[in-house]
Image (cartoon, rainbow, N blue to C red):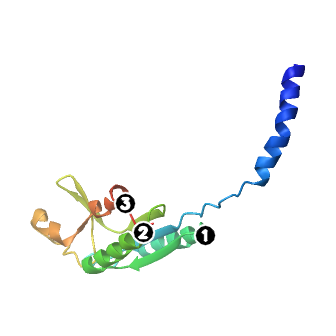
Amino acid sequence: MVAILGLLCLSLPGLAQSQRDLSIERIPEPRRIALVIGNANYPAHKLVNPVHDAEDMKAALERLGFTVRLGKDLSKQAMQDQVKKFLGDLRDGDVALFYYSGHGMELDGENLLVPTDFPMRCHDPPRQKPTVLPLTMFSGLWSSPRPG
């Protein structure tokens, strides 16, 4: 027991010396970025809550330190533009969140987001697939490196 205590005492001056020479590098907090979309104003069927839900989500995320881009009642082109900008702004280490409230559908095993200019009365759903946005458009979030 005495030998261990003596060894510990002999080590303390060296430990104190090395601590004085340490420089601590601060690791920056990751950026928190979110894209929030609420689509409610569909031509054949207006929804009540999506825009309000998106506004509430934006406020909640901002309280958590997120920078939020909000889109309301977006056409397919506007949704594509927002998603492209969102994905293009991301860098390695960012915390990214996407929230969507509005119509969605599944077709041939693929989950799809429905923009406000979608023709709601369609007789052949597979032919309408080009008018919606697949969730796979976000696959780049976890598969490709981003600039730091």
**75 lies left or right of 101:** left
Residue 43 appears in the figure: no
Q: Which mark is residue 14?
A: none
- Count residues near mark 3 (Cα–Cα under 10 Å), then give few for <14, some for 14-19, many for 20+: few
Q: Residue 63 carries which label?
A: 1
- Identity, as a three-letter code, of the amino acid under mark 1: Arg
Above or below — where is 9 with respect to 85?
Answer: above
- Residue drawn at x 27%, y 69% as measured from the top left: 114
Q: Mark 3 points at which residue?
A: 145
Task: Give the Cα separation between the discs numbered 1 and 3.
Answer: 28 Å
Of residues 87 and 146, the one nearer the viewer is: 146
Q: Which mark is residue 90?
A: 2
- Residue drawn at x 28%, y 75% as measured from the top left: 80
- Identity, as a three-letter code, of the amino acid under mark 3: Pro
Task: Give the Cα separation between the discs numbered 1 and 2.
Answer: 20 Å
Q: Earlier in the sequence, mark 1 or mark 2?
A: 1
Task: Give the Cα separation between the discs numbered 2 and 3.
Answer: 10 Å
| Quadrant of the image occupied by residue 38 | bottom left
Of residues 37 and 82, the one nearer the viewer is: 82
